[in-house]
């Protein structure tokens, strides 16, 4: 793999997705069949975004903020009102606990939400996150195509006594 290709792939892996069309063009000039995969990674279909949006909207937040505030209040009462700053909120963590919704949203309504957002160019937070996730999935597939194949480890024959 030459230095230019490696540099482009590293930048794309770091989130510089504007380099994908440049990668596709570079591969096309070399006659590399993976240029089509790179070109496709640079475009998102509304259905791909909607699929991710269904996953996002299928999970509702937990009651963690209620319990966090109750705990902070209990600590405040225990210490007699001393100004203690304790941040027990885990909402900033990606792995904050969530629970599945009883009725997940339909793919059709999520697709309508995506198309409306693209048409009006006003992206709600969940649609923007779905776009990011859909793009990341395509980029990961693209980068996986350029990973060297793992050599097979030879299996040693069983020892005979």
Image (cartoon, rainbow, N blue to C red):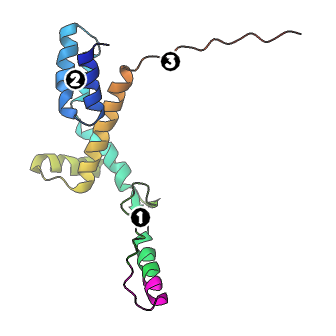
Magenta-colored stretch includes residue 38: no
Q: Quadrant of residue 137?
A: top left
Question: What range is drawn magenta here?
Answer: 73-84
- The residue carrying mark 3 is 150
Q: Please provide percent x and percent y for residue 69.
A: 41, 78
Q: Is 123 in front, or is 82?
A: 82
Q: In the image, is 119 to the left or to the right of 54?
A: left
Tell me the CA gap for discs 2 and 3: 26 Å
Q: Residue at x 22, y 52 (%)?
A: 113
* Residue drawn at 40 percent across, 87 percent down: 82
- Classify residue 142 by image quadrant: top left
Give the residue drawn at x 40%, y 74%: 86
The residue indicated by pointer 1 is 90
Quadrant into which the N terminus falls: top left
User: Neighbour class for label 2 at 10 Å: few (<14), some, many (≥20)?
Assistant: some
Using the image, determine if residue 68 lies above or below residue 58: below
Pointer 2 residue: 39
Quadrant where the image shows the C terminus: top right
Closer to the observer: label 2 or label 1? 1
Q: CA distance from mark 1 to mark 3?
A: 39 Å
- The answer to which of marks 2 and 3 sits earlier in the sequence is 2
Label 2 with label 1: CB-CB less than 8 Å: no
Measured as percent of width and height from the top left, residue 88 is found at: 43, 70
């Amino acid at each position: 793999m030459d230095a230019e290709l490696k540099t482009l792939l590293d930048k794309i892996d770091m989130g510089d997705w504007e380099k994908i069309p440049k990668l596709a063009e570079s591969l096309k000039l070399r006659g590399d069949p993976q240029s089509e995969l790179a070109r496709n990674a640079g475009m998102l279909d509304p259905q791909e975004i909607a699929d991710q949006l269904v996953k996002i909207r299928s999970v509702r937040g937990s009651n963690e903020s209620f319990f966090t505030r109750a705990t902070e209040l209990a600590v405040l009462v225990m210490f007699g009102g001393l100004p203690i700053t304790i941040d027990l909120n885990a909402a900033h963590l990606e792995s904050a606990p969530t629970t599945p919704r009883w009725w997940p949203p339909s793919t059709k309504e999520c697709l309508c939400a995506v198309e409306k957002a693209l048409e009006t160019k006003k992206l709600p937070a969940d649609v923007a996150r779905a776009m990011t996730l859909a793009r990341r999935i395509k980029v990961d597939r693209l980068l996986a195509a350029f990973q060297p194949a793992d050599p097979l480890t030879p299996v040693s024959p069983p020892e005979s006594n």
